[in-house]
Amino acid sequence: MMPTNLNSVEEVFTIYKSAVYEKNVERLLSIYSSHIHIYDCWGEWECRGISQWREKVEEWFAGLQEEGVDLQTDFTDVVIEEAPNLAFAHCNLLYAAYNPSGEKLRHITNRFTFCLRKEKHAWYITHEHSSLPIDMETGKGLFRLK
């Protein structure tokens, strides 16, 4: 699936939000370069390539489906620096899980950095890095600071 509206970095984030809410694997993958390199704070150190990322996204969305929750995302404190063919953005990304009746079950906020490259007049994420501050006494991630 080739997206038709990746004319701005903001549009990439809009597709991210809707694809996560819809649990639409193909739509989410459509905003990533085939050579994506991800540093994530969940489970594994990194993910390289769209095939490996597909496996992670399928697992993530299947878990949400099995649990019967909808996941809403909200990008805050977004800063975008853009050149003609490269861009980077950093932000906070809130993930909030809701049950079918609309009750909020939980939420976390991660810090993100995205690097994007313009290919054939469209922006694609080529690198994604999520992080959390760490409590120095416990060594655990601090998920709910914002």
Image (cartoon, rainbow, N blue to C red):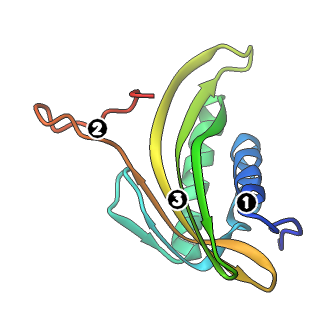
Find disc 1 in the rendering and name its residue. Answer: 12
- Residue 88 appears left or right of 9: left
Residue type, numbered disc 1: Val
Residue type, numbered disc 2: Gly
Mark 3 surroundings: few (<14), some (14-19) or many (≥20) residues within 10 A: some
Q: Name the spot of residue 70 as percent of width and height, x first.
A: 68, 31
Residue under the image location 81 percent in, 81 percent down: 121
First along the sequence among labels 2 and 1: 1
Residue type, numbered disc 3: Lys
Query: Contact (CB < 8 A) between labels 3 and 1?
Result: no
Q: In this picture, is 67 found above or below 8? A: above
Find disc 2 in the rendering and name its residue. Answer: 141
Q: Quadrant of residue 67?
A: top right
Q: In this picture, is 59 found above or below 97? A: below
Find disc 3 in the rendering and name its residue. Answer: 56
Comparing labels 2 and 1, the label whose residue is closer to the camera: 1
First along the sequence among labels 3 and 1: 1
- Residue 44 appears left or right of 10: left
Task: Tell me the CA gap for discs 3 and 1.
Answer: 19 Å
Element type where label 3 sits in the image = helix
